[in-house]
Image: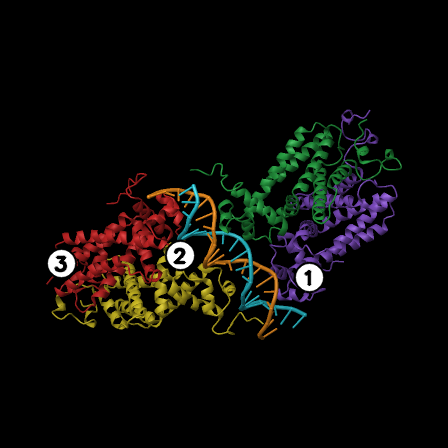
Chain colours: A green, B purple, C red, D yellow, E cyan, F orange
DNA sequence: TATGAATGAGACTTCATTCAT
DNA sequence: AATGAATGAAGTCTCATTCAT
């Protein structure tokens, strides 16, 4: 009788199918150029069906955000809980996770990267709780790192967090767009990005004449 | 210089008045929610007049980009030519310039920050030459810095450039949105951001006692 | 009698439950703003069930009309057969019956009053046989009254019928809408309305100083 | 420059053309079945043009009401100011006016007759000020007539007003619909309706065998 | 050049109706 | 007989763009 509970009759749940389709369409056209009818066609449902699961087009965007951010956060939480390293190690993990996610799901990367910006302008009142949660997780690591002496305490933790996020975000956007044409060594990029953010771009005395290899750049743990 | 301060009725240039109006409207509503008629009203011209200077709404966006990026690049070129320091100093200057610009023209900051992202999706074929030029300038500094040993050569220069831009961009977005409510010490942020990108967030041996952290907590490195 | 008082789950008759629900919804929203799904919910059935009993939404309206008009006509026939008075007395009875019905079932009053008008425009081809029957009954009384000298024969009987109906209809609409807010003495209104239609509003010689009481107004008084 | 003031460039004002078209379409299809595009086509304008003059479809209905009721009220006021007779004479004038109007503009008659009912349900919050004004004018006459002994004071003036309006309204609706097929002597109907409402339908002693002529029925005769 | 009323394509959304279960 | 998720036709309304003045 009640097919609501599990609802796995036709593929992986119609709501999920619609969200998947929306991700694809939003990523390729952008939210405003995406037509509801195109999402419907991509999802293999009728136009009206979308309105059985979502209040309107905006709501599709919002729920898609929440759905994907939730997934990202759960993956992040998993990875971090497994990580036994220093806060710096964990930030490196976080960067790798992002790069991995973007590699496996370029649409998601582009979507998050492009549309997240608009959410400031688009729906000013929408507070985007999942993204705030994401920033909070990252900030907790930074604060812990500052407390324990791994991270410079004279830097504002919120600024660090934003800088990290911005750098990752932009690099991912570039890589994603680039990888659509030519292949890029994304894993290498992750390491370099982590090096840059953790150790800075300036050379150091101990770097010697011929700069150290990436691995050698890591916080000295001899 | 900006002449929109006076903006007499038959203003300095109708085209410029329209661009100024577009900046204001795009910043507050976003490109897609901005109505041509609102730009016209803000500029004090008739709707049709806009089409005497611009091919269409997209073209207003593009020309606004070019106009503002040109201005930014010219400011940047000036600042850099004046600067006699190392490439690292010049990057620090660049960061300060951005923060200054954003402080003086929050609309511009929000516009660039938000709409630039879309230009990837929005007009895929539009190559955004001014932005490319901007990245080129920054990259030249980085490459020079790597050649002269100021910047770690094992980092991909394009990645460095993107990371710098992403970090600045995100921090500016945050600061701009935040400053609309509460006042923020933006100049301090510029310095910290430069410290972070140039020197990294990890503490170093030579950081010594000065750091405000419990020295005992510092990453064990013996 | 109305059985919707109890309306057990497998109620008296699903068709009747739907009609009762439709009356409620049509009265409160009007036919065009009423949603089939709302009727279904009110009736406690599934949307699709309605189409087992009715061809479409229009058909619900039509059958509801016929159902209620049939009821009104049967009540009317009863009352009139019981009445031994003159045609004028019977018209007075008819007016009272209407006012009584409207008092006991405001939804019905509003529904008939508002939606009947549309049936002229709405479904031009629908002849509304029950309403025609209603008018025929009223007309028979009038014609009889004219034949027997109770009613002025120089007035067109169809016009009299329409005028009576129109006056009742409008007064009921007003009373119904008004009574939803404040309480109104509806029975008194029925008497006055009958006085007006039967004896006219102009004073008469015999009315004397203190106008005649309603009961004294009854004709004939030769 | 400003063509707004007079705006008589293209026929009798575009707003008026749209209202005229709306009247025609609403009368023939009813409000809910009327399509905005049909109004536009009938008016000879583009769909979008309608939204330059009206906020939405509902607004067209409301403004049409106000426009036409204003016209009716102005005609009514003229006629009544010219009339030197008793309140009863003036009510007779009012009835004649209505019948004349309906004769000359059947669409208007049908529109007012059918759609006015819905305005109770349709837009409950809309108070329909013009109609209220109309009722007020009629009621003033009735109250004056009661004060001066022409109209029976034991009848509630509001009820009289509603009964008069209802009777006129219904008779007009019938006549209008009927006259679309066969020709009807409408002027005669006006007289008879006035006789009925003013003097009632019951015969009177003085009516004698061959009922009194309309003119002889006029009050007062004390 | 400038205007701004007018245009009309096209998007979102609703909801009566269907049909597989 | 009953369900209610799904359908998709169709309507309202927006707004970039045009063009007669």
Host chain of mark 1:
B
Q: Which mark is residue B35?
A: none
Decide: is C90 above or below D181: above
Viewer-closest of A87 and B181 = A87
Identify the disc placed on residue D127: 2
Residue that lies at the very extreme toward the left in this rendered image? C222
Across and down, in percent, residue A85 comes to: 72, 28
Task: Have a look at marks 3 and 1 and say if they share a chain.
Answer: no
Q: Which residue is mark 3?
A: C86
**Structural distance between the alpha carbons of marks 3 and 1:** 86 Å
SS for tag 1? helix
Horizontal side, residue A218 vs residue C111: left or right? right
Secondary element under disc 2, as helix, strand or loop, is: loop
Q: Which residue is mark 1?
A: B17
Same chain under badges 2 and 1? The reply is no
The CA span between labels 2 and 1 is 46 Å
Q: Of circles 2 and 1, which is in front?
A: 1
Please state which of residues A148 and E15 is positioned toward the viewer in this rendering. E15
Query: Mark 2: few, some, or many residues within 10 Å (few <14, many ≥20)?
Result: few
Residue D82 placement: quadrant: bottom left
Circles 2, 3 touching at the beta carbon (< 8 Å): no
Q: Chain of mark 2?
A: D
Instruction: Determine whether B47 is above or below B211 in the image.
Output: below
- Where residue A104 sits: x, y (%)? 66, 41
> Is the residue under label 1 in contact with that under label 3 (CB below 8 Å)?
no
Q: Is residue A62 left or right of residue A197?
A: left
Name the subunit of mark 3: C
Report the mark closest to the observer, 2 or 3. 3
For the question of whether residue D154 can be seen, the reply is no
Rendered location of residue F14, percent (x, y)? 55, 58
Give the position of the C terminus of chain C as an image quadrant: bottom left
């Amino acid at each position: 009788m009640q097919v609501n509970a599990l609802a796995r009759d036709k593929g992986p749940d119609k709501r999920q199918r619609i969200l998947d389709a929306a991700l694809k369409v939003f990523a390729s056209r952008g939210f405003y150029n995406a037509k509801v009818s195109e999402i419907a066609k991509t999802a293999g449902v009728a136009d009206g069906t979308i309105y059985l699961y979502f209040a309107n087009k905006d709501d599709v965007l919002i729920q898609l955000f929440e759905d994907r951010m939730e997934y990202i956060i759960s993956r992040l939480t998993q990875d971090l809980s497994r990580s036994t390293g220093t806060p710096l190690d964990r930030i490196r993990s976080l960067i790798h996770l992002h790069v991995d996610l973007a590699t496996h799901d370029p649409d998601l990367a582009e979507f998050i990267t492009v549309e997240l910006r608009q959410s400031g302008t688009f729906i000013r009142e929408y507070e985007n709780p999942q993204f705030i949660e994401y920033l909070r997780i990252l900030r907790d690591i930074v604060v812990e790192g500052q407390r324990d002496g791994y991270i410079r305490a004279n830097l504002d933790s919120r600024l660090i967090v934003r800088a990290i996020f911005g750098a990752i975000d932009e690099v991912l956007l570039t890589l994603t767009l680039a990888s659509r044409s030519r292949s890029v060594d994304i894993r290498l990029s992750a390491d370099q990005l982590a090096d840059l953010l953790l150790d800075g771009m300036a050379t150091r005395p101990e770097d010697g004449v011929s700069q150290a290899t990436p691995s050698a750049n890591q916080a000295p743990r001899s």
